[in-house]
Every structure is written in C-alpha cells, then in structure tokens.
Image (cartoon, grey):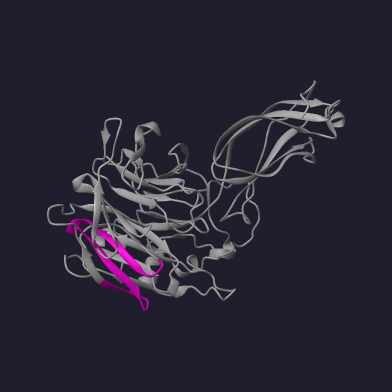
Amino acid sequence: LFIPCCMLALAASPARGASDAGATTLVSPPWTHCLGLHKVSQFHLDIYSGYREKFKDPEGLFCIKLLSKDEPANPNDDDELTVYGVNTGASDIIYNKSLTSIGIVGQLGSGPMEFRNPLALTGDKEGDLFVADTGNDRIAHLRYENDQLVWVREIRAPGDQPLLGPSGISLSGGLLYVADTGNDRIAVFRPDGSFVRSFTPELHGAKLFKPFAVAAVTEGDDWIYYAEHFLAVTDSLGQRVWKIAPDGTALRLVRRSAVGGSGSFDHVAIDYYGNVYVTDPARGFIHKFDRYLSYVVAIGGTGEGDVRLDEPKGITIYRRFGQLFVDERAGAQYFWIGTDLLRFDADNLVFDPQRKRCGVDVSFLLTEHSDITLTLVDGRGKTRFTIIPDYILPLGKFARRIEVDCPDAEALAKCELRVAASVKATYASRAYLVVERESRLLVPRITALAPR
C-alpha cells in the first residue's frame, strides 16, 4: 500500500542487469533500480510513518506521474511516480509526498477528509484523486497540492438514483466509472461531480450483480497500444469478470470456475496492451487475461517461486513503462511486467538440401507481447542457424509449422540439433530480462519441402 522512496525512483529507462532465464511474467526490478527494496512490510511502514500507522486491510491502489513532479527538460529526471493506497481498516490514505517522506490523511467519519470503509481510488496527472468512500455512499474528491492531499468535494448521484456502497472507481477518457455495488450498476460521472448516466449490462441471460472493482481504458487515455476501449469489472461476489464497452454493452464474461480451483476475483488493472490483471486474495494469485478475456496465466501463489503473494488485493499499473504495484495483507510489492515462454516444444525437424530449406513444428505459450528469436543449436550449445530473428509476437498460444530458407541445409541435416528460443518483453524489463528456452535434442529428417 505504501512504497518507500527507493522503490519510487522509477527510471524512465529501466537499468540493465544480468539476464534471468528463470524469471516469470512479473519480475522484480534489478538491485540498481530499487536497491533491492521491491517488497515492503510493516517494518518499512513503521520507519516511514514514525510507528504511527499499521497495515490494516489495505485495498485499492493507484499510481500516476504527476505533472507537478515532471521535469521533461531534465535528462536525469527519474520519473518518480506517486502511489496512493487506501488503508481500509484505518479509514485513511497513504501516499508518498516525495522520495523521502509519506503522507497519511483521513480518519473514520462522514465529513471532509473522513472515510468509512474506502475501497478504491483513481486520479489524473493534474493531481485530482477520487476515492470510492464505500461506507458513506459517495465519491470523495481530493487534490494533490504542495505535497499535500486536500479536500475538494463529495460526489453523489442524483437523489432518485443515490450511490449505494460504491466499491470500485476508474478515471478514463475524462469520465469516472464507478462500480455502484448496491445498485448493481456502473455509474458514470464527470470529474466535476455531475452525473452522466448509468448502465447494468447483460449477456446471455447473465446480469451485472454487485460489481466490485472496475478498470477502464477509453478514448483520450495515455499509453494504450490498441484502439480498443473497454471496462474490466469484477462482480458476483468475486466469481466473474466482465469486459464491457464504454456505452454499457457487455462484450465478454468469464466465470471464476473457468479458471479452476477455489478463490475469487478481486481488484483489476489493465496494461498498455489491454491485458487484464485480476487479484485473487484467497489463492495468492494475480490472474492475467488478454484483451479478449482469454486466460493466459496465474502469477504467484504462496508456494515456492519467483513471485510469492500473500492475499493480494489492490493492483495498479503505470502503463508507460509496465510498472506494476500490488498490495497484500501486510505489505506491498513492486514488479516490472516481464514475459515467459511456457510449455515450449519443437518437433519434426526437416531439411531439404536440394532447395536449401528447413522446417520445424514449434509450440509454446507466450505470456506477454515479446520479441522472440528462434535458432538451431548443436549439442555443444553453439548457434548454427537462425530460424526467426527478433520477431514480435502477441501473448497467447502459438503452434505452427515454420519453414524457411536455409543455406546450410545439407550440413545441418547431418547434426543433432535443438531449437532454442530467446524472448524479451517489448517494454519495461526489455533491457533487463531475457528468457531462454531449449527443446529436446532433435534428429533431423531429409525430405523435399515446397518452394518458398
């Protein structure tokens, strides 16, 4: 929920480090980037708060690069992000005021700068911050001024359509999208507090029910690769996630049972490519979907592995550089969006010496948009031929037969070879992370291949 100063010195160009073939879809930044502090606990919060604040049911997170902290003319500007988090059980908000101090505002109540069970927040680079003040049936509008959060106003729906337990909120394209939980709807406001509309989407007989979290990417937003605008919403007591058009049309619905196992969908975030990340506190996972809500991978868990999460809830992504923050039961973690190549396999390696061609069947699951290079390596690990050089692929399943020109087909047909893959995410960890995989040893066949 609070990220200490050294974690918030976020470099515009992530630092270089050694490649890490064992990394996963989310990676911890290199030591040179955050001095090793990519995970914070109550110990860190004690130090920075003077022992006056405790993690108490942290929920929503939001990060932004404030214009007031931007120095575009300074090549050494480290693009420090401001990260806000709701410490729900304490009815307050924690945020970093600078690289050396934090701010804590709020208390239990219903007046200005008071909250009752706040669950989510969102904002903009101008310094506006909007909080889903769930227990007070309102949206609290704050503003960041001179390193302080100040009260602006409360936002409520019209008298005949009052908000009832709003639990999620996302500012996108100049509009506030609010998960109005008690009214089974998404309510839409302008930042000045004026009510625009509301909608309750339906799809194949299913209707939005008790929406909890919402994330949106719409026209006018920064750092979106695809011109596809939508809302991602969790509902039905954490058992579903929706993809909804900004006009309220339901586009896709995925049930938690389709993912397998127990657990529930909680908070949600969307990255630069429109991929959807959903936290699962009970299982200790972050579930990653593509922009069509096709399931990609589960990240984390409480077992052994590169990413271990303890009841993850709030999640936020700075889309420009692929920096992801997630809070936990008693702390928070900071990651870069990386990539992974799962279930990599190659088979049916064939050479045609007469036409100087080769072909091979390749399959894998790619967990992030990546640059991928496929090569043939011999038993000593020496690269003998490049099948595909530095080719960009979207995330998802890949299973294809690849046939290419191969000038050394005659010589290579006499070798036992492996297909090797080298993969880099297209942003965030690109200069830091290289994922490498190799197939089993293949014995080539010689046969005629079709001309190119």
Tell whether 331 sits left or right of 372.
left
Q: Position of residue 42 (x, y in %)?
A: 37, 62
Can you say whether 73 is above or below 317 in the image?
below
Q: Position of residue 224 (x, y in %)?
A: 48, 53
Residues 268 and 401: in front is 401
Can you say whether 216 is above or below 79 in the image?
above
Inspect this view and state whether residue 99 appears. Answer: no
Quadrant where the C terminus lies? top right
Tell whether 7 sits left or right of 89.
right
Q: Position of residue 199 (x, y in %)?
A: 25, 45
Quadrant where the N terminus lies? bottom left
State the image quarter where residue 350 is shown: top right
Q: Position of residue 185 (x, y in %)?
A: 24, 46
| Chain part drawn in magenta | 125-151
Q: Which residue is at 78% across, 35% downward?
A: 379
Can you say whether 51 is above or below 159 in the image?
below
* Residue lying farthest to the top in this orientation: 447
Inspect this view and state whether residue 240 appears. Answer: yes
Query: Magenta span has 123?
Result: no
Query: Magenta span has 127?
Result: yes
Residues 160 and 64: in front is 160
